[in-house]
Image (tube, helix red, strand yellow):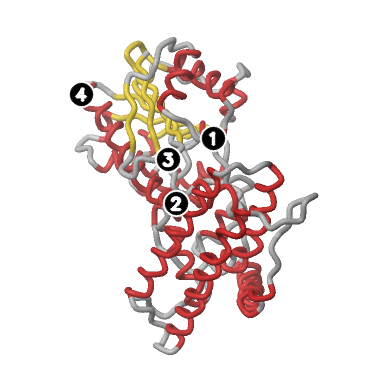
Amino acid sequence: MLPMITVHEPFSEDEPSFAARLRRSLAWRLASRSRAGSAQLQAPRLVGDGHQPVAWARLRAPLEGFKAAVFAANAEADSNDGVLPDATRDRIVEQFHGFCALLNEVLLDDMDGQEHEELAAWLQRELLPYLLLTETAQRWYTKPRGYPGDFLTLEMVYRNEPDGRHAIGWLVDHCFLDVAAAHAVRHRRGLLAEEIAATVAARGGDTARVSSLACGPAREVFDAFSQLDDPTILHVNLLDIDPQALAFVAERAGAEGLEAQVSLISDNLLRLAVGRCGSDIHDQDLVYSIGLIDYLKDGMVVRLMDLIHGMLRPGGRIILGNFHPSNATRGLMDHVLDWKLVHRTEADMDRLFEASAFGRPATRIRFEERGINLFAECVR
């Protein structure tokens, strides 16, 4: 059951709460006007020939149906002391899943660059008023740290606590937190905690040395430490370019008494990968990155692999995470959230490892539970 809908600002250090309230107030007005005037909306037209894009024709009715259902749910909550029945919530979440699946289907059709741009502009215009009423999804869209997938964004996905203004904000936030990509992010945390634990076990009591590159909130590291009777048998380097990410992790490490076991390193991985001076990390048993290389082109990924090869001891492992083309949320991420990733297959990862200092295909590839985030391992 949904409690009384209120607005919370749990992560306000980089966005004043007054500005957030103002933005959401404006979003509420825009959403109301968008709903009231939806019958008069005009389809985008392709440059040159003036016909309605096929993609728009396929997506308009499902999108309008979703928006109508959300407004009806808001009215239902208003008439029920702010409480929304679970059945209503689940029905609308499934409706949103169906729209996301259709959006992915549309992506597979022959569309030129102009069509993709028009589709993205139309979808953002239609959904932005709803996004800005949410707590989590609006951060995915606005990217207040200047890039998608920052440490607070990932922390909010891990917490999985939808919120927003009015029942609409809460409900749309719930929809976005329930998409396949969000589930994959939560699942991959457990997968990497398992890999860290396996690295510790393989050392047979000697200290295991692990490095996380572009560490973000490093939840999987603290999950791994929580399973150890003796935390001194694990030492972790956490490297990130964002000082606020490192401050966030430092606070967590201090609260859990792990300061001696966790080294925080502020550095730019891309500078390191092209051979510029930086952190001296070596003799590692495991070096991994959960969500970095799907922002990078192939050539830079190979350079990063070469860098990591030099960090590992003989027999040490690299594990790199990347979204797979089977990502059921790709259309939503590309066209609505402007959160574009380089999706790679198992064969793509093998090819990159072969081109790197490792000189051979991946020794193992794992997937998280949803099967859309792969983790490719290679042993030095």
Query: Is residue 95 shown above or below 293?
Result: below
Label 4 vs 2, first from the N-terminus: 2
Residue under pointer 4: 205
Residue 323 occupies which quadrant of the picture? top left
The residue that appears at 60% across and 42% down in the rendered structure is 110
- Whether pointer 3 and pointer 2 mark residues with C-beta atoms closer than 8 Å, the reply is no
Q: Position of residue 79 (x, y in %)?
A: 43, 89
Please tell me the numbered disc located at residue 342. 1
Q: Position of residue 126 (x, y in %)?
A: 62, 65
Instruction: Give the amino acid type for the residue marked by disc 1 in the picture.
Output: Val
Q: Position of residue 363 (x, y in %)?
A: 33, 19
Give the CA distance from mark 4 to mark 2.
31 Å
Which circle, 4 or 2, is nearer the viewer?
2
- Whether pointer 3 and pointer 1 mark residues with C-beta atoms closer than 8 Å, the reply is no
Instruction: Give the amino acid type for the residue marked by disc 2 in the picture.
Output: Glu
Query: Is residue 257 shown above or below 45?
Result: above
Please tell me the numbered disc located at residue 155. 2
Instruction: Give the amino acid type for the residue marked by disc 4 in the picture.
Output: Gly
Label 4 vs 3, first from the N-terminus: 4
